Amino acid sequence: MKISILGSTGSIGRQAVEVIQKMPDFFEIVSLCGGNNIDELRKQIKLLNPKNVCVKTEENALLLKKEFPKINILYGDEGLVEIAKDTTNDRILVSVSGKTGLKPTLAALENKIDVALANKETLVMAGDIVMARAKETGTKILPVDSEHGAIHQCLSNRNEVEKLIITASGGPFRNKSVEDIKNATVEETLHHPRWNMGKKITIDSATLMNKGLEVIEAHHLFNMPYDKIQVVVHPQSIVHSAVEYVDGSVIAQLGFPSMHIPIQYALTYPHRREGIETRSFDFIKALRLDFEAPDLDKFPCLQLAFEAGKQGGTLPAVMNAANEEAVFMFLNKKISLWNIYEITKRMMEEHRNIKNPSLEEIIEQDIITREKVKSISL
């Protein structure tokens, strides 16, 4: 299978490279796209010998061109789109962060290339447009998130589904008070109890906004109304999600916390092969499974996401943009963790929602919201 990785130097991208190394007879790398981590990208180029490489800046592109003259070096958002629409690919892994994933995903779908999607923002911002494009072109969107990958594996007849159950670890503040959350430091927030992820998604996990984004994503991926999507806190992160059917049966997907499994399934689908985590699960070692309802007083961002998803239009894109910019401000120690919720709520309340927006309108509202957040005073 010929594939390209957009975001190869990030957490998901690096683990995808490990999966690919495990089965070199199955995969051929066409392109690698990294950001500014040139040292990691160099290692991947030497390891996988791609035909094309994309980096964030022209400066880094010129630098790599000198080192690898036989490789086609591209840069910027235009380079990502160019690589995403290359019909040499059988599948594109989109694991870049933020809104950067939207245009390459659409480019791949328009060129009838299946997408393994690890970028939540693409469906949060423009889920209706993206899913319609996939349907029009007959292409597949394969979820990489462990939760959506689990649902994908448990889902059979959608007409018989009672609800989708999305699990959440609860993050580092599950047993803390609202006051603790308001006073949380960046370092405390980045200390996730179960998963090793990038900084932005780790902050989102601490506020449960990450779970809210996953709810919107699940709505689009599986064409499921919001009143049939439930979030359940499961601190052991062994049940990755489940599907309840109308007869009362519940089918769940289990595994110890590792992104290698859902990444591999999305890349090899519809096949299953031995991989890095083969024979890793042991029911005895799992010991116990606990479940509880999320505390919306402590994690109100989850409620914001449900509200944005139900209203639709441009509101989910505004919520996503506000949250993302606020997360960056928190990481730079300009605001508190609780301010992320307050800023996002304020941007949503001030927004005049556009129903059935075009892609251009979604992108415009994304830009406007980000500028507002950057100039906000608390």
Image: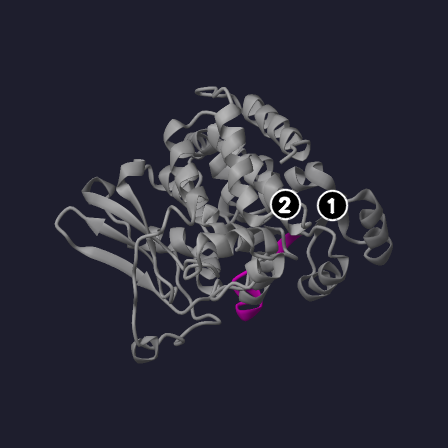
Q: Give the range drawn in magenta.
A: 20-31
Front label number (2 vs 1)? 2
Q: Is residue 266 shown left or right of residue 189? A: left
Q: Is residue 174 magenta?
A: no
Q: Which of 18 and 194 is in front in this view?
A: 194
Dot 2 lies on which element?
loop
Q: Is residue 286 above or below residue 232?
A: below
Disc 2 target residue: 335
Rendering coords of residue 345 (x, y %) = 49, 34
Residue plotted at (28% across, 50% down): 155
Q: Which of 147 and 322 is in front in this view?
A: 322
Seen from the viewer's position, the closer of residues 194 and 339 is: 339
Instruction: Assign the C terminus to one quadrant of the image.
Output: top right
User: For mark 1, what is the residue?
Assistant: 56
Q: Distance between the residues labelled 2 and 1?
A: 27 Å
Q: Where is residue 170 in the image (x, y as percent from the top left)?
A: 41, 58
For badge 1, the amino acid type reads Lys
Relative to residue 68, is residue 306 drawn left or right?
Answer: left
Badge 2 amino acid: Ile
18 relative to 369, above or below: below
